[in-house]
Amino acid sequence: MLNRINAPELTISGNLEIVDAIVDKLNNGTPYITTNSGTQEVIKIDLVFEAGSAYSTHPIIANTCNRLIEEGSGKFSSAEISEMLDQYGSYFVTEAGNEFATLSFYTTGKFIHQTLPVLKTILTEPTFSEEEIETYKMQGKQRLAINLNKVDFLARRNFLNTIYGDNHPLGIMSKSEDFDMLNKEALLEFYHNNYRNKLRAVFVAGKLSSEHETAIKNLIEELNFNHSNINNVVEDKILNPKTTYINKKDSIQSAIRIGKKMFNRKHVDYFDFSILNTILGGYFGSRLMSNIREDKGFTYGIGSGLATDINDGYFFITTEVGSNVANDALKEIYFEVERLQNEIVPEEELNLVKNYLFGSFQRSIDGVFALSERHKTLHLNNLTAEHYLNYISRLKSITADDIRMCAKKHLEKASFSEVVVGP
Amino acid sequence: MINFEKFELANGLKVIVHEDKSTPLVAMNILYMVGARDEDPEQTGFAHLFEHLMFGGSINIPSYDEPLQKAGGENNAFTNNDFTNYYLTIPAANLETGFWLESDRMLSLAFTEKSLEVQRNVVVEEFRQRYLNQPYGDAWLKLRPLAYKVHPYQWATIGKEVSHIENANLQDVKNFFKKWYAPNNAILTLAGNCSVEKAKELCKKWFEPIPSVNLIERNLPKEPKQTEMRRLEIKADVPSDQLYLAFHCCSRYDNDFYATDLLSDVLSRGKSSRLYQQLVKDKKLFTDIGAYMLGDLDDSLILIEGKICDGVNPKDAEDAVFYVIEELKKGISDKELEKIKNKTYSSLLFSEMSIANKALNLAYFEMLGDADLANQQETIYNSIKSSDILSISNSVLTKENCSVLTYLSNHHA
């Protein structure tokens, strides 16, 4: 008779192989990092620039420049550029954070020779035509107006404003009028200063033949962009924690954000804190999910996280709950935070989290694009693969008491800011 | 190209294995052929609520998630109108834990009152978060009953209304399980570091003892042909006007599916597509517009949805969409056809990047009749001619076949 009660034996090997990236440099010194593996003939080229919102006093120019760069260049209109990319199943994904802006170009081995010239014109001679800027303004204003009707959007931006203030790129709350200040000259200037002159690094990933590799590298060399490696640190001070209630009438759910400024992955407590965060709200079986969703049924989802970049990081708890139970949910959130400060995590739970995180890490390096992302994180943070090995070794050695100490040190309720958006 | 082997257990469970030794993980996917279309009209949202209950403990194992996480695994699930899909990824060394958990919940659930009560609340909050507390979030709740008058696609997976979920009782839940959750109504796929021999051994051990059930043949009413345009206008507290056009089209099983899918691509695949270029970029009537085919297993819909620019009359915006449609009916150039086929080629490649996606793709095509269809998609799409697409656009993209939903903002009344 099959025993269905007892779980099969587990094997947690704890050994990990991280396939190294090939780290090279362009003629001008730009780091050029290749991850070559996989079975599909797909290629991704990430160009990372020092062109995030910290590089301008205008609140949305970094984002706009990032989005409009593919909307017409050289002798080609925006429509023609789109046509040339779509014709060969290639596309751009653009992203601007507060530090870096990234242009990710996706193409296939089959069509790489047709699409690389398009990439070149996009990168080297964007036009930022008035007409495209006008369209973008209309789109941006409408998108913002819709977002301002969403409780989670309101909670997020007010929370970041509370902890970073009005002068930090993360804390700025963009307004409809910001779009009116956009113009061609400002965008071209930002492009020249921050794209042509501040290429931080290039990451190439996919199943690459040597011919592909040469073609891509030649193209990037020909761009003749200047390399830069300067972190634009925005001066910021710790603001006093604050509790804010924002009224959104007729809302049937309330959005909650709680947290504080924290640190990034270079901090000595980073590994401990990320394991602590997992226990609190970082996976499906977390304390917050178990209590507030799976026991009380107050929400569809609740979680916590540590958002990090090169200079900085912040910690947050986020959820949307039935408005009628918002106060009960807040009480339970703080109950769970305090429990981690005052009580030792049971051995069984800690082991579960360790195993889970080990499996998560394996998942996070599975597949060529995922692996390339990890290499990117390491490189941009000036870290080596040793960082991940140290993480795995800390995962093995951390004790329940270390977790409690970490919670005591970093999860003081008095240090948190809280934002609730509801009726 | 996904290489695989297929076998069937004595109880009717179909199993597909794609071995990939380059990963230390295995993705395990179980697709049950039951969805929202199988619900009682007075108990909608049930298939999805049931998906939540599948995590509330099974007959021999009090918790699903805990042992899986302890084994380094992660999982999730989704429900749509046609099927319910559960998937997990796990380090290959612990694959048997996945078999233990999935087979036990296929055998039977714990059916506790506590789990039902909590998940009813969770799903009600999901209903509120995704459909009721978002601008335009209820579009599908309005659009489905407009487009479908008799077929169960007239309700969304989340359900017609919150009360249907609140009223679900344990006996209903048990009946639903007995009717649909059985090996002969499921497809199991494994993708990753697992050999066919290993898969056979584990299937024999964990799944083969589960009894099959007598499946009742699905007998859903066919949606009658729509003969005149239907309209619904909603005056709402939203920042700007939005337009939704739904056209009836064929099912995923129909040979016309591929031409219909490419038709929606001609309209809206990529920024160079007709709708985006003409209506967003040239005429500046919309800030965004897109079209897609739902691909349901019964007669389905092509959707066009657009955000109308502030200051533009919604009727003018709608007329402009029909103008683009009429222009399309005049012809598609070879270059345009090649473009959408190249797009299809690259998205097929990108869709096979992860083992989890490969496992889902194989299960999905096996549900359609043959897992190998996953490997034939490119060839089939390539065989479509522009005349095929034009003939679909002539029969499908007509006013009398269209349901129009418009949100009118009361902000600039």
Image: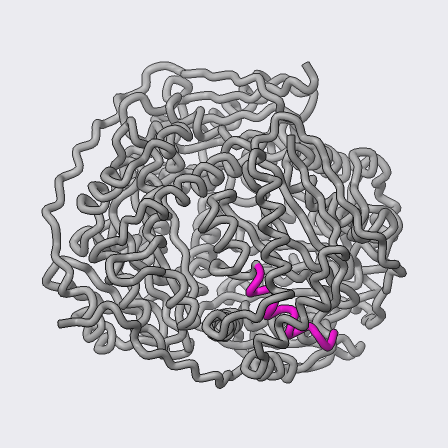
Residue at 70% in and 36% down: A144
Q: Is residue A328 visible?
A: yes
Q: Image quarter for residue A227? A: bottom right
Task: Read off the magenta span.
Answer: A267-280
Q: Image quarter for residue B296? A: top left
Q: How many marks?
A: 0
Q: Is residue A114 visible?
A: no
Q: From the image, give the main secondary structure of the stretch colored magenta.
A: helix
Foreground pick, B305 / B396: B305
Residue at 53% in and 21% down: B406
Q: Position of residue B47 (x, y in %)?
A: 31, 41
> Which residue reaches farthest front?
A342
Q: What colouring method underlies this structural image?
A: one colour
Residue at 62% in and 83% down: A390
Q: Position of residue A194 (x, y in %)?
A: 83, 60
Left or right of A209: which side holds A3?
A: left
Residue at 79% in and 46% down: A60
Magenta-colored stretch includes residue A276: yes
Left or right of A107: which side holds B211?
A: left
Q: Position of residue B303 (x, y in %)?
A: 44, 32
Q: Position of residue A176 (x, y in %)?
A: 78, 34
Magenta-colored stretch includes residue A408: no
Foreground pick, B56 / A235: B56
Foreground pick, B277 / A351: A351
Q: Is residue A407 above or below residue B32?
A: below
**Which of the image's four quarters has the C terminus of chain A?**
top right
**Which of the image's four quarters has the N terminus of chain A?**
bottom left
Foreground pick, A168 / A86: A168
